[in-house]
Image: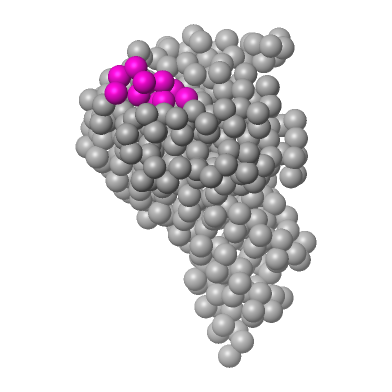
Amino acid sequence: MSTPLLSSWLRLTFDQEDGDYHTYVGTHLYDRLRERSEGKKGDVLSDTIMAALAVDLLSIETSALAAEPGRRQRTRTRAAYQLLRSMNALAPAWGEKFEGKVGPFATADELNGDEALMAAASRAISAAADQIEQPVRRLVETTMLPVTRLHDEQMFIRIIQIFEGLYVHIGRCLGRAITALDNGDAEGCRDELSDAAHRLDATPALFRVLTTMPREAFAVIRENTYGRSAVQSTSYRRVESLSAPRDPGSFSPQAPLLALEGETLQEVFERQLPELPPQTVTRLEESMRRLDAGWHMSKRTHWGITLKIIGSAPGTGGTSGADYLQRTAEDPLFPNLIFSVRRRMVRRT
């Protein structure tokens, strides 16, 4: 481990008093690795990181099932197995490379019984290991630093690390979509938006694993993670900030300031409306609406799961938990989209 990497990693090991979401998840370490590649190579690396996290999660849960068989653990292991199956949608740049190496995934009927489930999981884990580079495996291993002894927290960390990787990629898609549209490449913009929306459509597989968290376990995790809240996620805020102008007051006071240069996608779209052919406007609108719907669905699902797990109690880091998520779940990515299109149509009549 290089000296800069070691110093960044050490920060994660003694952050109990002054840590935040990023030291809990290890986002700076993952960002450092992602910075080594750009473009398509960067997408492959980013997707490989998400896949490696999913593989490690399945390994953790399969070992737990072997050690303590039971209905709850069986349910989680099955969910983790299905999550790895979903990598062709959540992380397609890696999933395409992985597909064919593992052979056909077992169907739901074939996963009946602990032995069959563990055998299928072991085959998938072994096949995936050859498709993940050593630096990525090492990083995944060194960023499992729970603050409790609960097995549930290991699952929790891996799931939020995968979500973090997903948000990073969606932010990259939006950044490239803005550049493409600004340069007159509407189809390139649509391709980026479709990529982001396609991935969001696969997030139920992540939430399915998260729903196996018992309420009492999360209460312990919450008690021991004060000051660490997902509302502090820079990658999540970047997605919303790249989409449309935001009122700073719409973000939680716990969220760090995020200053982005240049126009948002909504602003570029509105500026170019008078010059775009009607068919292009319609196609762009459809792509933006699909991404907006996927983002909305993900936030609504997150709110519902949080309500189930913690009820009205404060969330991690002392946030208002489910109440805060409910308030923000209805905020669209592109608030002015429908009004911009209506203005366009009025000008043409």
Q: Nearer the viewer, residue 238 or 131?
A: 131
Residue 158 appears left or right of 280: left
Q: Position of residue 336 (x, y in %)?
A: 51, 65
User: In the rendered image, which quarter contains the N terminus?
Assistant: top right
Please identify the quarter of the rendering in which residue 61 is found.
Answer: top left
Q: Main secondary structure of the magenta part?
A: helix
Q: Residue at x 61, y 27 (%)?
A: 129
Residue 239 appears left or right of 323: right
Q: Which residues are magenta?
A: 59-69
Q: Residue at x 46, y 34 (%)?
A: 120
* Residue 249 seen anywhere in this rendered image of the structure: no
Q: Nearer the viewer, residue 338 or 93?
A: 93
In the rendered image of this protein, does residue 184 appear above or below residue 320? below
In the rendered image of this protein, does residue 168 appear above or below residue 297? above
Q: Nearer the viewer, residue 252 or 237?
A: 237
Q: Residue at x 42, y 35 (%)?
A: 80
Q: Is residue 63 magenta?
A: yes
